[in-house]
Amino acid sequence: MRCPTLKELPPPPPGKIGWPWTEESPPLPDTMPDGRPWPRVSIVTPSYNQGQFIEETIRSVLLQGYPDLEYIIIDGGSTDGSVDIIRKYEPWLAYWVSEPDTGQADAINKGWRKATGEFLSWLNSDDILLPNALVQAVSHLVANRDSLLVYCDQRVIDENSNTLFEIHLPDFELRDVIRSWLNPVNQPGFLMRSEVLKCVGFLDENLSFSMDFDYWLRISLRFKTGKIDHVRQIWSCFRRHSQSKSSMLKRAEVEDHFRILEKIFKYEDLPVDLRVFYPYVEKKVNLNAAFYFYKIGDAARTRLYALKALRGPVDPSSVNALKLFVLGTLGNWLMNRLRKWYRCVRPVRISYKSVYQIRYK
C-alpha cells in the first residue's frame, strides 16, 4: 500500500500541530532512482493500553510518503480507547487485531508472521518515526548489500513529545557489546532484512523487556558475514514516561538479563575470546539485581545477589557489591532507614549518560 497523504487521514485532535499532525513526508515516486520499485517495508506496532500515544505513533508511520508500506498493529486487548483509535486508521492498515497475548514479544511475533515485506521492523505504540525515516533506512540497506540491519541515533521525548535529549550511540561491535553488556541499538527506527528473521527466528517470548538486546546478539552470532550498521542520523523518538519506568519493568529487565546471559554464553558458536567475559558479565548482572532489590527494600535478595557478585572477579565494582551485602545483612527495616538517611550505594548500572555522547536540548 502506498502511504496516505495528510488530507486522506482523519483530522488531528484539536490543538495538535506539527509532525505528524499537520505535517507529512513528501510522497516518493513509485520507483527508486535506478528504476526498480521500492521494496516493501513491513512495520509491526505492538499495543496495549497506550491510548494516550498510539495515534501519534500510527500517523508517524502512515505519513512517511513511502510507496509500499505494510503496517500491522497487534493490540493485546486494550480497554483504554486504543481500539477506537486503531479503527479510525483501519483503511490504511494491512492487518490489525485486538486480543489477549502473552506480552510484547508475542505481539511482535504475531505481526511478523503476517508480514510479507523485504524489510521488517517494529515500533512500539508510544514511540514515533520522524519525517523521511523509512526512505533513509531503506536507502541504506539497498545501497549496502552486506548490511543485515541498520539503526540510528536516538532522540528521547517526554509525554508531551518535547525533546529531552539526544543520544549518540556507538557502532555495533559484538566484542564491545558483550564486554560492556549494554545495548547500543536504538530499537525505534531500526530496519532489517526479512532473511534475518528466516535465519535467526522470532523474538524470545520468554523475555518481557530486553527481547531486542537478545535479538541483536543472536543476529550477530548467527551470521558470520553481514553487518549491523549504525547511521549517525536520528530517524525516530523514544518516549520516556511514567509507565515506561515502572518498578515492574525494571524487575523484568533484571530477570531478562539473567536469561540472556545463560543463553548467549551457552551458544555453541560463541568465540573463545568472548567466553572469557562470562564471569565479568555475570558479576554485573548480579550486581544490577542486588541494586534493584536494594532500591525496593528487599534485604534478603539484596544480600543474595550481592554475595554472588562478590564471588566474581575483583574490580572497582566490588566495593558496591560489599556495601550492598552489608546493607542486606541488616534486615529490611534498618537497610531502608539507612537508604533514606544516606545514599550508601551509587547506581550500579552504567548509564547511557556516562557511556555514550549525549546532547541535551
Image: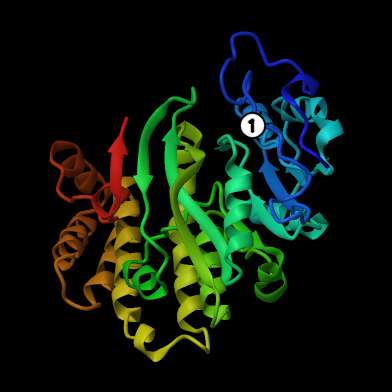
Q: Residue at 52% x, 78% y: name it.
A: 221
Residue 123 visible in the current orientation: no
Residue 242 screen position, x and y as percent: 46, 32
Total marks shown come to: 1
Q: Residue at 26% x, 65% y: name it.
A: 306
Secondary structure beneath dot 1 equals loop
Horizontal relation, residue 105 to residue 264: left or right: right
**Crowd band around label 1 with a 10 angstrom C-alpha radius: few (<14), some (14–19), many (20+):** many
Horizontal relation, residue 355 to residue 74: left or right: left
Q: Judge whether 149 appears above or below 138 on screen.
A: below
Q: From this viewpoint, which residue is outermost toward the top?
A: 14
Using the image as rendered, state which of residue 41 and residue 94 is in the foreground: 41
Residue 204 in which image quadrant: bottom right
Residue 3 screen position, x and y as percent: 76, 36
Q: Quadrant of the C terminus?
A: top left
Horizontal relation, residue 151 to residue 273: left or right: right
Q: Quadrant of the N terminus?
A: top right
Using the image as rendered, state which of residue 267 and residue 335 is in the foreground: 267
Horizontal relation, residue 262 to residue 128: left or right: left
Residue 96 screen position, x and y as percent: 82, 42
The residue identified by callout 1 is 25
Residue 147 screen position, x and y as percent: 56, 68
Using the image as rendered, state which of residue 30 and residue 241 is in the foreground: 30
Q: Judge whether 349 appears above or below 163 on screen.
A: below
Q: From this viewpoint, which residue is outermost toward the right?
A: 91
Residue 277 in which image quadrant: bottom left
Residue 8 visible in the current orientation: yes
Amino acid type shown at disc 1: Ser
Q: Residue at 57% x, 57% y: name it.
A: 140
